[in-house]
Amino acid sequence: MKEDPRHIHISEYSYPLPDERIAKFPLPTRDQSKLLIYRRGEVSEDVFTSLPEYLLQGSLMIFNNTKVIQARLHFRKETGALIEVFCLEPIQPNDYVLNFQQTAHAAWLCMIGNLKKWKDRQLKREMTVKGFPITLTATRGECKGTSHWVDFAWDNPEVTFADILEVFGELPIPPYLNRDTEESDKETYQTVYSKIKGSVAAPTAGLHFTPRVLDALQEKGIDLEELTLHVGAGTFKPVKSEEIEGHEMHTEYISVNRSTIKKLIDHDGCAIAVGTTSVRTLESLYHIGVTLAENPYATEEELRVKQWQPYEKYDQIPPVVALQKILGYLDRNGLETLHTSTQIIIAPGYNYKIVKAMVTNFHQPQSTLLLLVSAFVKGNWHTIYDYALAHDFRFLSYGDSSLLIP
């Protein structure tokens, strides 16, 4: 019987993180960040450009190609009050691509800053987008937990919602940086391979990669593949409950192409994941395959990976078989891409199926991401974090990186 992680006390996953150790800005050259190498219990350090030297030729490395959107919108009321509307996920239409293409109306689930100042009336803002003067209105709908349904409308069919965010939105850098977004963040808070708009936070392990590192990986004979997980604001949600059973994981939307799944099968269901978002997606694929093994005609809704599913529906099918079940599902439905969502929580007691090594930054104390790392290194996370604290590593989104090989 596997260990049930629900009764893990989050207080056991704490460490001292002084504010001066949190990197407020990235280094001038991305790939000159420090790289901690953890291999089978041993810790050393290098510079990020050396990453390819530590990987086996013929390995498969998988990146999250999501792009951060300028999701914060500011409206000023006639009274002078400033209200922030932070777009979290699309509701109508609920597909990211379709929503960004809307030319008159779009609805999103949003967090509202200064909510008490937003009474019944519509918020309005005049702006010029692509040379067109438009009026954008925001109307608040029902409350959903800590978020609200917000309807956006504008009066020019030449302008898409993506255009509005591009001109009017502000990039949402992490709250723990304790500073305003600067113009430079528009470039430095995106990976060099970002393509698919939808995240409200960057997959930060990818921020260290440059074209020369990517070229060096390919020269080493490492296969590079991409998938998409749109990072939600829930990634910053602290664990407030004493035991993690009381913490509700956020839902994140994933899409994985048939070609990536085939490549995974070619590599015996083994991959090096860049970032915890890639980890969550790859491990979710296994559990989607388990669902399809039980029910080949599962609906898209039934394929969603629930928070505790890996601990409840435990199956010993090999990863390659699970991945083949997904290919079969795509074939039956005439699909090129798997679209679904995951709420998976990876914590000590979890048995990794696909991810054999990971590149990741240093995470906040008492976070679900620290639980994910601990599960990967069999509880030995203190060794890694003690070394990083003692050797001047920079922490969190703009900080340094690590390569973990358990």
Image (cartoon, helix red, strand yellow):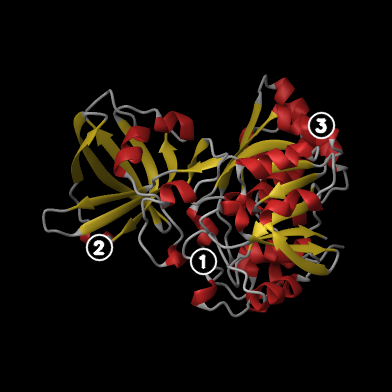
| Relative horizontal placement of residue 263, taking residue 169 as reference (left or right) | right
Q: Nearer the viewer, residue 55 or 205?
A: 55
Q: Tell me residue 378's x, y (percent).
A: 81, 66
Query: Mark 1 to mark 2: distance in Å?
Result: 33 Å
Q: Which residue is mark 2?
A: 116
Mark 3, secondary structure of its residue: helix
Residue pointed to by mark 1: 23
Q: Which is more toward the observer, 191 or 66?
A: 191
Q: Is residue 217 left or right of residue 199?
A: right
For the residues labelled 2 and 3, the Cα–Cα distance comes to: 51 Å
What amino acid is at disc 2? Lys
Q: Camera-side residue: 175 or 342?
A: 175
Closer to the eye: label 2 or 3: 3
**Residue, x 72% and y 37% (percent of image)?**
224
Q: Mark number for residue 324?
A: 3
The residue depicted at 39 percent of the width and 45 percent of the height is 70
Vertical comparison of 309 with 265: above or below? below
Q: Are discs 1 and 3 less than 8 Å apart at CB?
A: no
In x, y percent, where is residue 349? 78, 64
Q: Give SS at disc 1.
A: loop
